[in-house]
Image (cartoon, grey):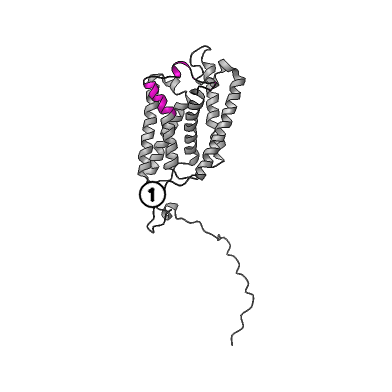
Amino acid sequence: MTAPLPRDIPDLPAIPGVPAFLPSPVPATAVVTPVRHPVAAVYRVLVALTAAATVTVEILLTSPIRALSYFAVQSAVLLAAVFLLSARRAWKARRPLPSALTGATLLYATITALVYHVLLTNASSPFTLTGAAATPTGWHAVTTHLLHTAIPAAAAADWLFLTAPGRLHLRQAATWLLYPLAYLLFTFTRGELIPPGTPGRYLYPFLDVDLHGYKSVLGNALLLGLAMYALGILLIALDHARPNPIRHRTKTGFRL
């Protein structure tokens, strides 16, 4: 006869030195098939080339130092570089660029458009541009329209129709303000290096220390910074609420 089985079988002791779960050497691309996005790649290349050409023409019309001192021109340079890198990744089916970088590019392009249309060309604004800056002509009119309207609209369209939603995060909104803060310090430094009374010493009326003084300019900068932070949070909220424009069918017929 065989001995009866015990009612309680003790657990076997763990083998020392062996982890419970071994790390998987399988990359994510082996599980999820990479998908190329040629439409997004071509679109971003066209937008990047348009931004680069606009900046080039703007430099030729004025001067490199003055043109590159504008926030709109600097944001266009950043957009051109980011869109070229993003287009390369979309064409080669690689992972998209970090959302902190693409979100910052979108925010700065949106700021460029809103500041120009709400503060600088709005008749009811106390900082409305006057003189030739208010009504550019010739190639200046073309570059002004592209920098402040067409290119920001193209960046928004790429975000809405060619980018997966839910990639932006609330923690990124504060870091996006580092560049506007650096631009404010750059404006003050540039103004101190240029002799008083020189035309174009301060490129934006709301940052003109000669007209308003440092106290008022810092107050304007604080209000603008709060508005930019609120705009960043709004973009993040919209990014999580909008539908997914990028959908493709797998071999089973289900939508991903």
**Residue sitting at x 50%, y 23%:** 120
In depth, the one of 35 and 239 nearer the eye is 239
Taking the view exactly as shown, the residue that stands out farthest to the top is: 197
Taking the view exactly as shown, the residue that stands out farthest to the front is: 124
In depth, the one of 166 and 174 nearer the eye is 166
**Residue sitting at x 38%, y 29%:** 52
Label 1 Cα crowd, 10 Å radius (few <14 / some 14-19 / many 20+): few
* Picture mark count: 1
Above/below status of 16 relative to 213: below
Judging from the image, what secondary structure is the residue with disc 1 in? loop
Say which quarter of the image contains residue 252: bottom left
| Lateral position of residue 209 relative to residue 74, left or right | right
Residue range corresponding to the magenta coloring: 124-148
Image coordinates for residue 138, horizontal then vertical, percent: 36, 20
Using the rendered image of the protein, determine whether residue 244 is visible from the camera's viewpoint.
Answer: yes
Say which quarter of the image contains residue 83: top left
Asked if the stretch drawn in magenta spans residue 29, the answer is: no
Above/below status of 179 relative to 93: above
Amino acid tagged 1: Val
**Residue sitting at x 43%, y 55%:** 31
Asked if the stretch drawn in magenta spans residue 128, the answer is: yes
Say which quarter of the image contains residue 221: top right
**Residue sitting at x 61%, y 67%:** 13
Residue linked to disc 1: 35
Image coordinates for residue 140, horizontal then vertical, percent: 39, 21
Taking the view exactly as shown, the residue that stands out farthest to the bottom is: 1
Image quarter of the N terminus: bottom right
Using the rendered image of the protein, determine whether residue 188 is visible from the camera's viewpoint.
Answer: no
Image coordinates for residue 148, horizontal then vertical, percent: 44, 28
